[in-house]
Image: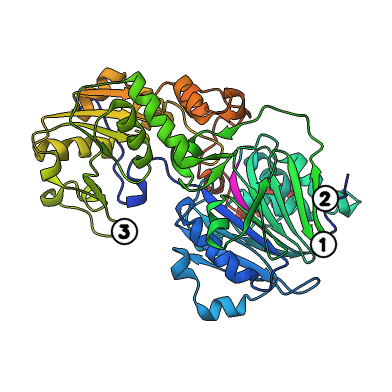
Amino acid sequence: MFWLKMSHDDFQPMQDDDLQSEGRPRDHCGVFGVYGHPDATTLTYYGLYALQHRGQESAGIVSSQGDGHQLVRHAGMGLVSSVFDDATLKMLRGNRAIGHVRYSTTGSSSVKNAQPLLVDCSRGQIAVAHNGNLVNANILRDELEAYGSIFQTTVDSEIILHLMAQPRHGDRENNLLNALGRIRGAYSLVIMGENEVIGVRDPHGFRPLSIGKLDGAYILSSETCAFDLIHAEFVRDVEPGEIVILDKDGMHSVKMDVPSGRQALCVFEYVYFARPDSLLEDRTVAHVRMALGRQLAKEHPVAADLVVPVPDSGNYCALGYSEEAKIPVEFAFVRNHYIGRTFLQPTQLIRDFNVRVKLNLIAKAVEGKRVIVVDDSIVRGTTARARVVTLREAGAKEVHVRVSCPPHRHPCHYGIDFPTSKELLANEHTTEQIKSYLGADSIGYLSLDGMIRATGHPASKFCAACYTGDYPVPFESDLDKFIMEKRRTQRPPLAADVVDDAQQRLL
């Protein structure tokens, strides 16, 4: 271990051709790591399968056969099942591995940005997989490039590798701490060196990261559902600001030497992102979502015949609403789980193809009924409106929309790909306007207090900036997903340096 010393017309909703971009918040990333198991690569492969809901753009694994051995990497675009095959997994065999599934929150979706990233530098081989978003990435990259760093990607995660490789800190045992001291924002990391696997969670704890154990080997995962799949024992969560080192001597823990700040676990993990069978801060996500539904029924009751969930993230909330309201649940929307990217644009003949291809309605179940539709969130409102239209066309007598979180009025800068403020429906319009736009008989959002109460934790534990605008960590005003790509257009042509130099000599 050599990095760390132990110490309606008014509305203009965005139209997307990608089914993953249907006006909902999109997933971010999932990380996984294993140290000390002979089948580490296979375990990582299955771990990424369990975390696939956190990112479907690319997947990758870096592995090693032991201390001092070369690190081997394979990554590609697509789902885990399409990126890896038997031959690839044999090539990656080893007793330690880290893996990543990605949805891009900084940097475009391309194979060069697939993780884990792997470099070879004076400190040996280093690989990193990152869930989150660095809010000072642009500043740090400018600084690093000024000192001659050459970047191969447009992801903020590469900045972490460059900082770790800097020689100017002298004491190389401390360079991970120095690197972490420079970055700001949300990050849960799994890092592999030639002798260890390391897990890191930022001081605010924006993104989850847990520790498991299997046959004496240690596991790191974004969610505990991955432990269940491989029959690993859940040990505990990595604490905010904690660095966990896994090596031949076992597991060691170090706290970052940073000022203690407020905790800021993303509350939207409970609402939408985490799998319902995961344990998050000692609470099963499914149980929290049922509590959200019960609270929603208390705050926004309405006479109706059926409670209809929007699958999958609305299922447990709808069950809670049904239980509290004493109104039966009807799973009238059927989800198609086998959806890739659509390359042909829908025609007017199938004007709502992007909605119907994912969710189909059992029309007979809602015909003549007063229906309560329970969804986890409404972001741009395009799909919510289409679902109301579908219910009306099927003969629903009334359609009441209920949402298991407050209105999203502010973008996220910590790793969730929310749209800009102007694209957020609730930022631009009142609740009454939203009801009219959706074509619903009524709409009810869960209150912020009600949402927090349903989690069973105090408000001080969470980041709820997408609802309140209270951001725990300051960020650049021009920060967005493609900030690294935009930097290219802001530079003078390369030849300008030659011309400037020649003119200076003439003078």
Name the residue carrying label 1.
123
How far apart are labels 3 and 2 at the CA level?
44 Å
Name which residue type carries label 2: Asn
Q: Position of residue 369 (x, y in %)?
A: 12, 33
Seen from the viewer's position, the closer of residues 441 and 153 is 441
Seen from the viewer's position, the closer of residues 398 and 7 is 398
**Left or right relative to 470: residue 245:** right
Name which residue type carries label 1: Arg
Q: Quadrant of the N terminus?
A: bottom right
Q: Is residue 147 visible?
A: no
Q: Is residue 46 visible?
A: yes
Q: Is residue 407 above or below residue 345?
A: above
Q: Does residue 285 show up magenta in the picture?
A: no
Name the residue carrying label 2.
175
Name the disc covering residue 339, or none: 3
Q: Is residue 144 above or below residue 386?
A: below
Snapshot quadrant of residue 112: bottom right
Q: Position of residue 329 (x, y in %)?
A: 25, 38
The residue lying at 59 percent from left, 67 percent from top is 43
